[in-house]
Amino acid sequence: MPPKGRIEVNEKYCKACGLCVEECPQEVIGLAANRINAKGYHPAELINAGCTGCGICAIVCPEAAIAVYREIAKVKEPGA
Amino acid sequence: MDMLGEETIVYERPATLTDLSSHYCPGCTHGIAHRLAAEVLDEMNFRERTIGVASVGCSVFAYNYFNFDFVQAPHGRAPAMATGVKRVLPDRIVFTYQGDGDLASIGMGEIVAAAARGENITVIFINNANYGMTGGQMAPTTLPGQVTTSSPTGRDIEVAGFPIRVSEMLSSLDGAAYVVRRSLHDPKNIRLAKKAIRAAFEVQARGLGFSMVELLSTCPTNWGMTPVDAIHWLETKMLPYYPVGDYKVGPAVAEIKI
Ligand SMILES: Cc1ncc(C[n+]2csc(CCOP(=O)(O)OP(=O)(O)O)c2C)c(N)n1
Ligand code: SF4
Ligand code: SF4
Ligand code: SF4
């Protein structure tokens, strides 16, 4: 199982440049089609399951708008 | 999206950036350069002792976006101002943030002299192959044949001469301790750019002399492209003319492990 992750896009900063959409290896980011932020941009958001928390979207985001989280893999209890 | 179980933070906005939304155009990689500088200063714990020198160009308002002291220099004069600040306050980390119109045209004398003096400052040099702020005119870094508002049929090298490779040029000066070029066009190169910025600040912190990181950067607005197309243009057109590489790594600098 690939690690599970998620992102939070701070919509105040997002300018819908699409660089994160282009670079996400899992292709799980899109621009919200029917919503705009205060500046009038369609902000980026997760559109599908499958984010691994790799952080690539945050590395390419010029606005530092993305926070990335990854689930800590649980160590299985012996015998469980 | 579902919340996860127990999780770690992989990335969050660096504390050294203020909470202002930038004035940069969507997809402009000036923003990536800002972010990297902020991340590095956070990681080195240098925020409280850093002083930035903003230049003239789209990054003229850089002082709004960093959570430490900043001054703003007249066009091209940032290295001179940084020299003054650093000499008066030698324990501070002093860096300039300059575009290619600012640094390589009106400010060419200043940057050459600062590097030749081995001034113990750091320069972050944004090469986006044009004058962004004023509407996309030809800069010293504009590529042969590149269409700009002041070279509407493409830069004619017979008339306008050849583009200047600033890193290569400054690397010939004995005062320059660390001079490298990096690019902001993909995750791998962005990581390498961050490492170089860290090395440059390290050079300054150790008092080893002049350091500069040239960053190939996009200007989607004046290039007349989407942000994604601009990244592609940088990679296919700018990179061959401006290869990334370490142009000067002084002997004492080579010892630094990052
Ligand atoms: C003394 C002086 N001359 C000219 C100008 C006009 N001017 C403002 S920004 C700029 C060029 C900026 O281009 P660059 O340094 O490449 O930065 P960018 O905007 O592309 O980031 C010029 C010529 C000025 N402000 N002051
Ligand atoms: S963290 Fe990785 S997988 Fe998740 S959205 Fe960002 S780029 Fe895609
Ligand atoms: S890279 Fe950043 S600014 Fe651009 S669309 Fe994604 S979140 Fe928004
Ligand atoms: S004009 Fe060009 S350099 Fe200036 S903010 Fe816009 S895209 Fe960036």
Image: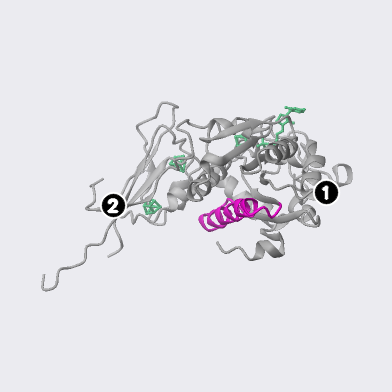
Amino acid carrying mark 2 in the image:
Ala
Question: What residue sits right under mark 1 in the picture?
Answer: B162
Image quadrant, ligand 4: top right
Q: Chain of mark 1?
A: B
Q: Position of residue A47 (x, y in %)?
A: 32, 45
- Left or right: B2, with B220 as reference point: left
Tag count in the figure?
2
In the displayed structure, B226 sits above or below B190; it is above
Query: Which residue is at 57% across, 64% downward?
Result: B257
Seen as rendered, the residue at the extreme right is B158
In the displayed structure, B176 sits above or below B26; it is below
Numbered range of the magenta stretch: B183-209
Amino acid carrying mark 1 in the image:
Phe
Query: Which residue is at 77% across, 42% downward?
Result: B104
Task: Place residue A32 in its image quadrant.
Answer: top left
For residue A49, the mark is 2
